[in-house]
Amino acid sequence: MSLHAQIGEDLRVFLDLDDFAEIHDVNGVKCRAVLQEISAEDLSGTHYEVYRDLMQVHCRARDLPEIPRYGQTFRLDGKLYIVGSCAEDMGMLTIKLEANDR
């Protein structure tokens, strides 16, 4: 099996609904995604970080109509966020989202 085929298989396992992924509304698209909440302990910075809701979303790039960009408003399961960053690697998007909870 080629490396490219193996990576595709790994994405399938990572986004399997029986393993890690769940169906989420990712900016208006129902798709398989893995969500990771980033806690204040994970951040090095000032105390204002406590009032932010930080999420990281992992999903397939092909599932979204466009690649999110920095500063764009973005809805995740109905909650409004701002895109802090978005990286694409071998078909997988890692989207960091920020929302003010105060």
Image: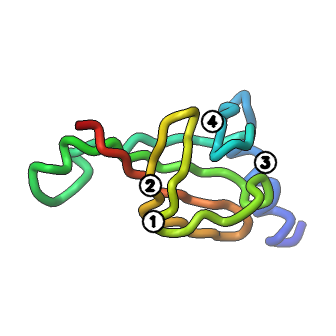
Residue at 53 percent of width and 41 percent of height: 35
Quarter of the figure with residue 100 = top left
Residue at 66 percent of width and 51 percent of height: 59
Mark 2 or mark 4, earlier in chain: 4
Give residue 36's position: percent from left, percent from top: 47, 42
Q: CA distance from mark 2 to mark 4?
A: 24 Å
Residue type at mark 2 is Ile
Q: CA distance from mark 1 to mark 3?
A: 29 Å
Mark 4 — residue? 20
Which label belongs to residue 82? 2
In the picture, the quarter occupied by the N terminus is bottom right
Residue type at mark 1 is Gly
Mark 1 or mark 3, earlier in chain: 3
Q: Residue furthest left?
A: 47
Q: CA distance from mark 4 to mark 1?
A: 28 Å
Would you say the residues marked 4 and 1 are in contact, meaning their CB atoms lie under 8 Å apart?
Answer: no
Instruction: Label 1: state its secondary structure.
Output: loop
Mark 3 — residue? 12
Which label belongs to residue 71? 1
Would you say the residues marked 2 and 4 are in contact, meaning their CB atoms lie under 8 Å apart?
Answer: no
Q: Is residue 70 above or below residue 76?
A: below
